[in-house]
Amino acid sequence: MSQFPDSSPPVFAERNYLNTPATGLKSWLTTLDHKRIGVMFLITTLIFFAVGGLFAMLIRIELLTPGPTIMDAMSYNRMFTLHGVVMIFLFMIPAIPSGFGNFLLPIMVGAKDVAFPRLNLLSFYVYLLGALIALGGMIYGGADTGWTFYTPYSTTTTTKVVPILLGAFILGFSSILTGLNFIVTVHTLRAPGITWNKLPLFVWSIYGTSVIQILATPVLGMTLLLVAIEHAFGWGIFDPARGGDPVLFQHFFWFYSHPAVYIMILPAMAVISEVVCAFSRKNIFGYKAVAYSSLGIAFVGFFTWGHHLFTSGQSAFNAGVFGVLSMFVGIFTAIKVFNWVATMYKGSISFKTPFVYFIGFLFFLFFGGMTGVALATVSLDIHWQDTYFVVAHFHFIMVGSTIMAFLAALHYWWPKITGRMYNERWGLVGATLVVSGFVFTFLPQFLLGNEGMPRRYFNYPERFQALNVASTAGASVLGIGFLVILVYILVSLKYGPVAGPNPWGSRGYEWLTPSPPPLENFDELPAFERGPHEYHDLPGVEAVAPGAGSSHA
């Protein structure tokens, strides 16, 4: 099978996972095909992303003016809790690993499916069950604790916090099952010729993410269960009046939730490593450094939770240790950034839509990372603690970076998933709106935080209104950008030009199979003689520009 597109017109693969004898809804709901399960995860997480985005817009509209604008204080508290729970637990954590990971990882290692197909389907239904229970709690009472569920408020509030806690507890099992499946698949189902040093960088990062999912998620599950028990029965686990400790909850929660940051950002980095090679037409610079830094981030991430507790009363020694350890994560991240930039050096860069999102990712990761280093400095963190500076930092480094990578993945692998191309001009318009809208939404919040505006507050002094209006205007641009993307992506499903097997001219293993892939991924298993990021020493490689092989490029 050719490793690069030829000059022949692209054709739509007749035998593929979308076009099988069983095409009804039941065949999808009972499927064991990792590609269909990945698509179901993608559709579901995108729906929750829209729900979380709607909550965010309502929050920004409310903050247009001091005092009530469209809701009262209690409704506001519930709204930002719902926004956080939906975006983090229902979209950001599962979207790339469970969605794109399920679809692509087996193909990238030359396998027919994941190691445990039935367990894979179970993980999807466990995810749905947890989501429905959490959403039920949101609809019938709604929590007002924030997505962190801090005690003692979460154990004493009269809102329906227990269903949301149980929903998040159940969602953890989906993450564990997915991570276990991926680790076993990588270890046992790699095709002949795919050694550890020839694994795609996407697989390396998903592997590191899976390790975190298995080791850290049980801690969160037990913690949330303890909060639910205390809220329901008043056992006093976190109540100092009964010998409990509310700060203990924070230690438990952040022991998971800081590694969970890397459950979100490591898969994003996985996407970026693939995109930068394909659109720079160059080998990855420092393959081993990029690969092993994923494991380094996963490892060090377990030792940095205490930087969330600088103002909780912990000792100065502990604060210093956690501050230094937090800096180490920046080292592994800097290794990746350096290698990505070096990969672009003297490359034949093509500014297609996925590459624009790559540039957006670099900006948000670098800018947000620098503010993270500042927040890891104890003296600065004390000033910015619980202000909008922290909100802006989190959204730049986590939400912005993750969404940029998710959209890069969506556009890069859309031809592989659907066999069709989207409209490139509208793709660039959507990317411009999303990147600029995100910047103008959260840049004013850095200024608000530096001036002392607390986060989570329903009301604020009038001197903060201009910056809040600017932030809401940016959010409006961001929302329009997402709507543009939704329209042209849906249109491409029916009217998009046929993509062909490899419209980008990529060396990735997933592009060695037809688009969409056949039921068992490969009509004939390739030899995998070269690495997945090697562009040198191939006949005519310089002549193949990204977009070749597609009538739409």
Image (spheres, helix red, strand yellow):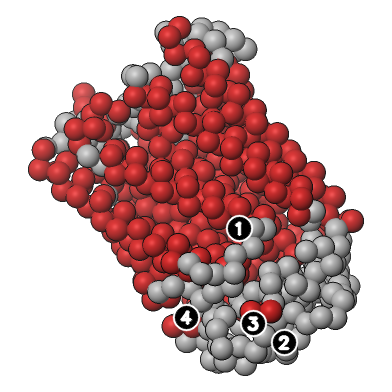
Measured from the top left, where is residue 372 in percent x and y? Answer: 33, 42
What secondary structure is found at the residue carrying circle 3?
helix
Q: Quadrant of residue 12?
A: bottom right
Q: Amino acid at mark 2?
A: Ser
Q: Amino acid at mark 3?
A: Val
What secondary structure is found at the residue carrying circle 1?
helix
- Disc 3: CA contacts within 10 A as few (<14), some (14-19) or many (>=20): some
The numbered mark at residue 355 is 1
Q: Earlier in the sequence, mark 3 or mark 1?
A: 1
What secondary structure is found at the residue carrying circle 2?
loop
Q: Which residue is mark 2?
A: 2
Closer to the observer: label 3 or label 2?
3
Q: CA distance from mark 4 to mark 2?
A: 27 Å
Closer to the observer: label 4 or label 2?
2
- Disc 2: CA contacts within 10 A as few (<14), some (14-19) or many (>=20): few
Towards the viewer: 506 or 149: 506
Q: Quadrant of residue 320?
A: top left
- Residue 33 vertical position relative to residue 131 in the rendered view, above or below: below
Q: Which residue is mark 3?
A: 541
Q: Which residue is mark 4?
A: 187
Closer to the observer: label 2 or label 1?
1
